[in-house]
Image (cartoon, grey):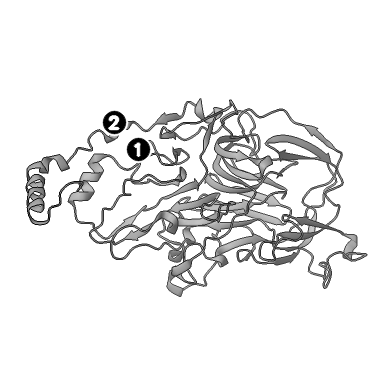
């Protein structure tokens, strides 16, 4: 179990992970000092790990006639066998008993707070261009609610049986999963810790995920979540794709989220002969099977289809050092491609502490209408440019092509003052789950008492300044007609 930090906000109050290194006066370290686990680093690498370092993994082949210690070889393939080498995802696991040793499947009761079909023909989802938001969702204060039981769906697009789409969930729990594991057969989960830490046990080993960190558990991988007290966070689920690092293009070899900062577990096995419940999600429905052995009995493994985590304070921000804003793609941590090469299925972006030094530039986000659907959340701190109702644990949503931007007071102040050299998002991390797909909103979120709308009256004061210059403009137009024979619209 992790040690308690003397200052729970120690890592929230740093500008960047580099501040923990003390300018080389102490040895550098890759994980927060209260993280109890060891990891392997590198994104999309092929790894191997043995909990018993005695030649457990077969060399030169994957499935020998006899594996050391009488272990069973089991392959997990996440792509077509003939997928291109750079896309091919698989892992070999060497375990005490294979996953096939179970006692069959039974249906679980429907969870009306989760959703998987986001097509408008589903009466349980809602289409709306209204700019919506939700105050922080309440964590259960009574009863025992674990990570899976506390799962609630907010919005999404598509359907997992089509292998194209995504969903956004929140989880609200107060209890660890006990003798219970979960496997999502629909897609990959990007999990964002917001309140409380997640001690995640997987078949490949353990991940400790704290607020300010994310992890990805991929389709078909079994895991359970241990918590200490009230815990809340977010999940971005994608169907038909895997997360990858965005291309860097003219940025060159380094920047944004660097591959070496992604951490993967090391093998850690659990041999227990006792009854376990394995919860499966398939097509949005929940099923269970029981087995008389721990699902985490993997003694060794190798492959490139491995869960991983990433500390958001390591993100290397880039931006303009002359004028104007660069497009928000510079804040992209992970992306998931769709079948349209010009429109990703999902991007996960963060807005974290950084410097803004662009001269002669309007500081807040410019008014914009863009094709992407945007769902934002706040992990900790205060996020400028949103109302006071945008709080850690809450959500803000804007549909594609719906115009948005700050209120007039902020516009006027930012236009009148010269832009200073300033730190943005001090002691705060917000994120955006963005997609080229239009989102529909679930019944649970639509009818939730935490829902409210961005009041359109906040833009009433956006006065027409142009009309106050009518006399000057008409004079200029008249002179233009005289000189060039051109005028407004001619």
Q: In the depicted view, which residue is nearer to us: 151 or 24?
A: 151
Image x and y of residue 350, in percent? 46, 52
Quick check: 417 left or right of 406?
A: left
Element assignment for label 1: loop
Quick check: 365 left or right of 128?
A: left
Image x and y of residue 452, in percent? 41, 29
Quick check: 208 left or right of 365?
A: right
**C-alpha distance separating marks 1 and 2:** 16 Å
Using the rendered image of the protein, determine whether residue 261 is visible from the camera's viewpoint: yes
Q: Quadrant of residue 46?
A: bottom right
Q: In the depicted view, which residue is nearer to us: 408 or 278?
A: 408
| Residue picked out by circle 1 | 388
Q: Reply above or below: 351 against 144.
A: below
In the drawing, what numbered circle is on residue 457? 2
Residue at 55% from the left image edge and 61% from the top image edge: 245
Quick check: 256 left or right of 94?
A: left
Q: In the depicted view, which residue is nearer to us: 488 or 165?
A: 488
Image x and y of residue 86, in percent? 66, 65
Element assignment for label 2: helix
């Amino acid at each position: 179990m992790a040690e308690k930090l003397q200052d729970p906000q120690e890592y929230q109050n740093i500008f960047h992970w580099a501040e923990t290194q003390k300018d080389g006066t102490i040895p550098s370290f890759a994980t927060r000092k209260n993280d109890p686990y060891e990891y392997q680093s590198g994104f999309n690498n092929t790894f191997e790990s043995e909990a018993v370092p005695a030649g457990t993994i077969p060399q030169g082949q994957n499935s020998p006639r006899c594996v050391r210690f009488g272990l069973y070889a089991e392959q997990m393939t996440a792509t077509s066998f003939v997928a291109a080498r750079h896309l091919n995802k698989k892992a070999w696991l060497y375990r005490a008993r294979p996953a096939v040793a179970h006692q069959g499947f039974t249906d679980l009761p429907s969870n009306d707070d989760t959703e998987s079909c986001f097509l408008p023909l589903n009466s349980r989802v809602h289409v709306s261009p209204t700019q919506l938001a939700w105050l922080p969702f309440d964590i259960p204060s009574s009863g025992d609610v674990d990570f899976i039981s506390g799962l609630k769906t907010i919005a999404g697009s598509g359907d997992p049986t089509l292998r194209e789409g995504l969903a956004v969930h929140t989880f609200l729990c107060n209890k660890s999963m006990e003798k219970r594991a979960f496997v999502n057969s629909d897609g990959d989960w990007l999990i964002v810790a917001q309140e409380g830490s997640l001690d995640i046990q997987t078949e490949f080993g353990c991940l400790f995920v704290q607020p300010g960190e994310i992890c990805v558990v991929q389709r078909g991988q079994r895991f359970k979540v241990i918590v200490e007290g009230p815990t809340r966070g977010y999940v971005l689920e994608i169907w038909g794709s895997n997360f990858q690092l965005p291309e860097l293009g003219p940025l060159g070899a380094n920047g944004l989220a660097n591959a070496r900062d992604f951490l993967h577990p090391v093998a850690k096995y659990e041999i227990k002969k006792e009854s376990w419940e394995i919860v499966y999600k398939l097509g949005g429905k929940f099923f269970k099977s029981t087995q008389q052995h721990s699902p985490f009995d993997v003694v060794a493994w190798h492959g490139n289809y491995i869960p991983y985590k990433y500390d958001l304070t390591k993100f290397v921000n880039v931006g303009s050092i002359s004028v104007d804003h660069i497009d928000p793609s510079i804040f992209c941590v992970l992306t998931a491609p769709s079948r349209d090469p010009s429109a990703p299925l999902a991007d996960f972006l963060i807005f974290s502490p950084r410097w803004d030094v662009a001269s002669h530039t309007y500081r807040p986000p410019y008014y914009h209408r863009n094709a992407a659907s945007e769902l934002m959340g706040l992990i900790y701190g205060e996020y400028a440019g949103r109302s006071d109702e945008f709080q850690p644990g809450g959500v803000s949503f804007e549909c594609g092509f719906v115009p948005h931007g700050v209120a007039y007071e902020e516009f006027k102040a930012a236009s009148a003052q010269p832009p200073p050299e300033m730190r943005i998002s001090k002691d705060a991390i917000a994120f955006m789950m963005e997609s080229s797909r239009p989102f529909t909103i679930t019944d649970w979120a639509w009818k939730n008492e935490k829902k409210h709308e961005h009041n359109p009256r906040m833009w009433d004061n956006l006065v027409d300044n142009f009309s106050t210059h009518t006399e000057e403009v008409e004079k200029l137009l008249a002179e233009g007609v005289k000189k060039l024979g051109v005028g407004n619209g001619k």
